[in-house]
Image: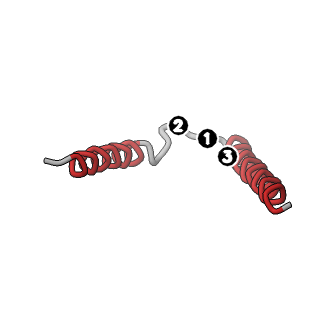
Amino acid sequence: MDENERDYNQSKGLLESIREINAKYRHPRIKMTRLVNISLWALRIYLIAMLLILFYKFATLVIH
């Protein structure tokens, strides 16, 4: 087996492991209250907004 095949098989195994872990934890085991759920969504929106601002700032610095 050459080096490319070995690397491919290792990355394929890694991706398969990640898929198994994601499938296992797809559904939470604890019950979240409505307030916790709203708070988590607010955090997601905040993080996306911060990333958008960061990319905007980077783009404006690169262009100018």
Residue that numbered label 1 is attached to = 32
Q: Residue 36: x and y, percent?
A: 69, 41
Circles 3 and 1 in contact, beta carbons < 8 Å: yes
Q: Residue at x 38, y 43 (%)?
A: 24
Circles 2 and 1 in contact, beta carbons < 8 Å: yes
Helix, strand or loop at mark 3: helix
Q: Residue at x 25, y 51 (%)?
A: 4
Q: Residue at x 17, y 48 (%)?
A: 2
- Tell me the CA gap for discs 2 and 3: 12 Å
From what the image shows, is residue 25 above or below residue 54?
Answer: above
Q: Amino acid at mark 1?
A: Met
Mark 1 surroundings within 10 Å by alpha-carbon count, few (fewer than 14), some (14 through 19), many (20 or more): few
Residue that numbered label 3 is attached to = 37
- Tell me the CA gap for discs 3 and 1: 6 Å
Question: In this orientation, which residue lies closer to the viewer: 54 or 19?
Answer: 54
Q: Amino acid at mark 3?
A: Asn
Give the total number of marks visible in the rendering.
3
Q: Residue 59: x and y, percent?
A: 78, 59
Helix, strand or loop at mark 1: loop
Q: Residue 35: x and y, percent?
A: 73, 43
Residue that numbered label 2 is attached to = 30
